[in-house]
Amino acid sequence: MYSIIESFSEKVHVPSDQMRFFLSFFIELPLCYILRYLPSNPRLKHFVYSIVGVIMLLFVFGINSMIIIIPGLITYYVMKWKKSLHAAFFIFSLNLMFLTLLQIHKYINHYLQWYLDITTLQMIVVIKLGNFAFNVAKGSNTNVIKQTYYNKMNNIPNDQFPSLLEFIGYFYFFPSIFSGPCIEYQTYKKFVTLELFESYPNNHLKNKIPPIDWKQFFIVFSQGIILLLLTSIVIIIPLKVYFYEIVINNANDYSFIQKMGMVMIFIYSIVFRYFATWKMAECMGILFGFGYSGVKENKPTWYGFKNVKLNDFFFSNSAKLVIDSWNIYIQTFMKNHIYESLELFGGILNEYKQSLTNLISAFWHGIYPGYYLSFGMLALHHDVSCGFHSRVEPIIIKKYGKDSLIYYSYLVLTFIYARISISYSFIPFVIYTFSDSWKFFINTYFCVDIIGLILLIILYIWFPKQQKRDRID
């Protein structure tokens, strides 16, 4: 099969690793449909799901993917022995260190090359095992954690600690093993036992998964196919070569508008790849049933395996909402586990919890300097966006109303700012090096970051943060 895929990849000029990755979704979708009809036997389901997961890993990543069982078993037995937040943070740090070693190896041997390998898989493993470890720790230390909705739904109490078979079934659950997002253990367990569907309207089918919402499935599937086609086009067209020609290497030969236009095109071509992956994964959540997320207005919803909100990303006028709209599960993990744990540890960790969380998030992505530059720039534009939304927008609405030309102009300007600032900030993330990032900044005159700094200064001088009573009034 590998030789057939290699031959086909050469004909269509798509790397074979990416071809296997995208083909895996079209293999898994029929499997999701078939495995809906497994007998209602949790032990059988755990066994079958894990076997399918291992086979899919071998297909996509090869024999090297088998190494992930080592951090998996270490996490399981450490958390079985010591169910504390410090143990959970230790396990997360250990798995992150292993990921970093893989990234250093890739950095040395495949510098500036992007391809699918064990490093990509370990990124998912770090989050999946981290989720499990922190949820186990929180389930055994309910007296010290925040009683948030997330914690109530996902914590794993001491008397619900899984058997090894249950853990292996969760760890290798094939729809979430190598592409993300990472399913929560409690969601997985309730899906296997069918507790997940207790709120499903008019569900009189005992021991069965509810019917497929074909309408919602085809909506998401269509989005995924369109994004896959766009991804295929941008893989074939050497957009990165054009970007370096126009923005980095021969920038003096092109106008500022041409350079900024290329920035936008290049970044959107990159995000299509991620969005296509997440949308196909979301399809599996709907088709298999584990994406069920409850009832809204007497209708079932299927947002439980959603990792990107396309409407917010493409149409929001807030840079904050754009940032929050993609890779949702990673942001959820960082917020509910890393940020919250640093806060609970107290001391200097609590004092710098936001900065440390951002640093850990960047560290998880890799060791290239561009990652850290991007996260710093995103923090700037995030703060500007939040400031305008909370301080300027209410004043405009109060003084001119939502139907005024001034308010509509404000929406248009903030929409443009959100699009450009996010795209500009992500350029270092995808070109990796500090030297190329510096050339990019020089050739585009630091324009977007200068605008962001000016806007931030304006916010602090002319629109100071209101006191709580003023906001209530």
Image (cartoon, rainbow, N blue to C red):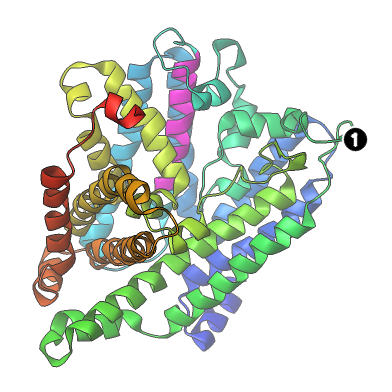
Q: Dominant secondary structure of the magenta stretch?
A: helix
* Above or below 189: residue 124: below
Seen at 39% across and 10% down, the residue is: 144
Q: Which span of residues is magenta-colored?
A: 122-139
Is 36 left or right of 64, judged from the image as shown? right
* Above or below 387: residue 136: above
Secondary element type, mark 1:
loop
Identity of the residue furthest to the front in this view: 399
Is 334 left or right of 57, judged from the image as shown? left
Seen at 29% across and 80% down, the residue is: 261
Q: Is residue 419 visible?
A: yes
Q: Is residue 429 visible?
A: no
The stretch drawn in magenta includes residue 264: no
Q: How far across and down, in percent of the image, does residue 424 sit?
A: 25, 66
Please name the amino acid that badge 1 sits on.
Answer: Leu
Q: How far across and down, in percent of the image, does residue 133 sit?
A: 45, 25
State which quadrant residue 341 falls in.
top left
* Above or below 209: residue 324: below
Q: Quadrant of the N terminus?
A: bottom right
How crowded pointer 1 is (Cα within 10 Å; few <14, some 14-19, many 20+) is rated as few
Q: Which residue is mark 1?
A: 205
Most foreground residue, 403 or 31 = 403
